[in-house]
């Protein structure tokens, strides 16, 4: 999650420097250009001097996200660690660092960062969802379901929240509950090939080959490759 940098500058050498910092701030906090363009803009903001800690933290956070986009998770973690050092209450930076830890395969660190993000901001649905995914990968299906349920309470319109809770229910052998969640995911997003595929598995595990086959046909229609 990126944040736009509000231009809070404690001191700048000249109006031209201020203008350049404003341009770089917009690039650093946006989605224009390439990841390399945004990293360069964030670096110039970071090196410009005179920024309040919270604004500097946003620049490190945003640069960290672009390092993630390049799959350079080590640099992402370094930048996001600096962001939380500068602003220890920066929930999004913990969330983003959790994403990098997970991408690197460090599930325990990812869970710790998502948990800290939620301590700071208990309404961060994405942190519940991502922590649920990590817990599912660790085999903790009950806690994963709890997290997916919290994510759904905060935002009931995201189909993947239901799909992934359904996958966890299925892993626990609760196929009826899984199918209920897959049904809702498909209602929200009729183009969700993943939900059809996972529902097919649940039907198969219930011994309903006809419905499993129908869902697999729909999955193949949506994902012909």
Image: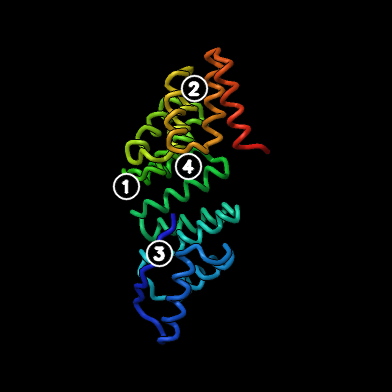
The N terminus - image quarter: bottom left
Task: Give the SS element for disc 2.
Answer: helix
Per the model, the C-alpha gap separating discs 2 and 1 is 30 Å
Mark with earlier residue (2, 3): 3
According to the picture, the residue beneath numbered tag 2 turns out to be 170
Per the model, the C-alpha gap separating discs 4 and 3 is 25 Å
Image marks 2 and 3: residues in contact by CB distance under 8 Å = no
Numbered circle sitting on residue 121: 1
Horizontal arrangement in the rendering, residue 154 relative to residue 135 (left or right)? left
Question: Looking at the image, is mark 4 or mark 2 nearer the viewer?
Answer: 2
Q: Nearer the viewer, residue 176 or 216?
A: 216
Per the model, the C-alpha gap separating discs 4 and 2 is 24 Å
Mark with earlier residue (2, 1): 1
Mark with earlier residue (4, 3): 3
Task: Give the SS element for disc 3.
Answer: loop
According to the picture, the residue beneath numbered tag 3 turns out to be 4
The location of residue 26, given as percent across then percent down, is 44, 70
Per the model, the C-alpha gap separating discs 2 and 3 is 40 Å
Question: Looking at the image, is mark 3 or mark 1 nearer the viewer?
Answer: 3
The residue located at (49%, 27%) in the rendering is 167
According to the picture, the residue beneath numbered tag 4 turns out to be 110
Per the model, the C-alpha gap separating discs 4 and 1 is 16 Å
Vertical order, 187 against 69 (above or below)? above
How many marks the image carries: the answer is 4
């Amino acid at each position: 999650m990126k944040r736009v940098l509000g231009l809070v500058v404690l001191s700048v050498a000249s109006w031209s420097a201020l203008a350049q910092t404003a341009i770089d701030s917009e690039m650093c906090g946006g989605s224009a250009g390439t990841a390399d363009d945004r990293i360069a803009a964030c670096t110039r903001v970071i090196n410009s001097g005179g920024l309040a800690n919270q604004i500097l933290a946003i620049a490190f956070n945003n640069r960290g996200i672009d390092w993630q986009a390049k799959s350079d998770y080590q640099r992402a973690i370094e930048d996001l660690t600096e962001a939380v050092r500068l602003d220890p209450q920066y929930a999004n930076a913990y969330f983003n660092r959790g994403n990098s830890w997970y991408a690197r395969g460090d599930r325990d660190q990812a869970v710790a960062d998502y948990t800290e993000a939620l301590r700071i901001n208990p309404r961060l649905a994405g942190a519940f969802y991502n922590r649920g995914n990590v817990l599912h990968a660790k085999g903790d299906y009950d806690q994963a379901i709890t997290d997916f349920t919290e994510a759904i309470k905060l935002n009931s319109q995201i189909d993947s929240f239901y799909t992934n809770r359904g996958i966890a229910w299925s892993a626990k052998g609760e196929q009826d509950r899984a199918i209920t969640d897959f049904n809702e995911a498909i209602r929200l997003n009729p183009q969700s090939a993943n939900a059809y595929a996972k529902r097919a598995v649940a039907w198969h595990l219930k011994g309903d080959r006809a419905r499993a086959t129908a869902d697999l046909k729909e999955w193949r229609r949506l994902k012909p490759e």
